[in-house]
Amino acid sequence: MTRFLPRLLVVLVLTASLAACGFQLRGTGGWPSELDPVEIRGLQPRDSLYQELARGLRASGVEIVERRPDDRGVTLEIASVNDSRRALSVSDQARVSEYELTRSMRVRLRPADGEATDLDTLRASRTYVYDETAVLSRSEREEDLRATMNRDLVALLQRRVRALTGGGED
């Protein structure tokens, strides 16, 4: 027991010093409090991207509302969402062996003062090896990759908003 005590002490000191310096894991910085609550426009509530946006924002302590109050909060306008798939490599039999999936969304942030800010186009992409003998697993794999890209887009959106507003929670 006594030989583990010095190691435990070192771990505790390192953990405390890391927390004291303000370090946060990427994506855990939160949503700026002046942009709460959030109304999401441009997506249907049953859409997987809407659900991931709502989940990610709620995890940051944000209230999602159907209609933003006139005096506070922000409207997140999803102007467009585009999906694409392109062949990355071809086998020696002239068959596609690898694909790249890309999901992009154009986003605008409209705070209570009404002045919209265009956040440009956010993109996430993933590649996968295509197996023509496993057609069902291919569609499941693409669905899993799209869910991952949705999470990536939400994290990218949160980082972009934090950078735009100068930080996370107060």
Image (cartoon, rainbow, N blue to C red):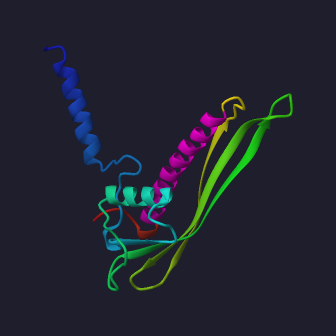
Q: On the picture, is 44 further left or further right than 167? A: right
Q: Is residue 136 above or below residue 113?
A: above
Which residue: 32% across, 80% down?
A: 72
Residue 46 in the image, given as x and y percentages of width and height: 46, 61
Say which quadrant the N terminus sits in: top left
Q: Is residue 141 magenta?
A: yes
x then y, percent, for residue 119: 54, 69
Going by the picture, which residue comes out furthest to the front? 136
Q: Is residue 100 left or right of residue 156?
A: right
Can you say which quadrant of the picture contains the C terminus?
A: bottom left
x then y, percent, for residue 113: 41, 85
- Tally the marks: 0
| Residue range corresponding to the magenta coloring | 135-163
Most foreground residue, 121 or 86: 86
Identify which residue, 131 or 133, lies in the foreground: 133
Q: Residue at x 57, y 39 (%)?
A: 140
> In the image, 168: left or right of 97?
left
What residue do we see at 65% from left, 47% from top? 101
| Image height of 137 relative to 66, above or below | above
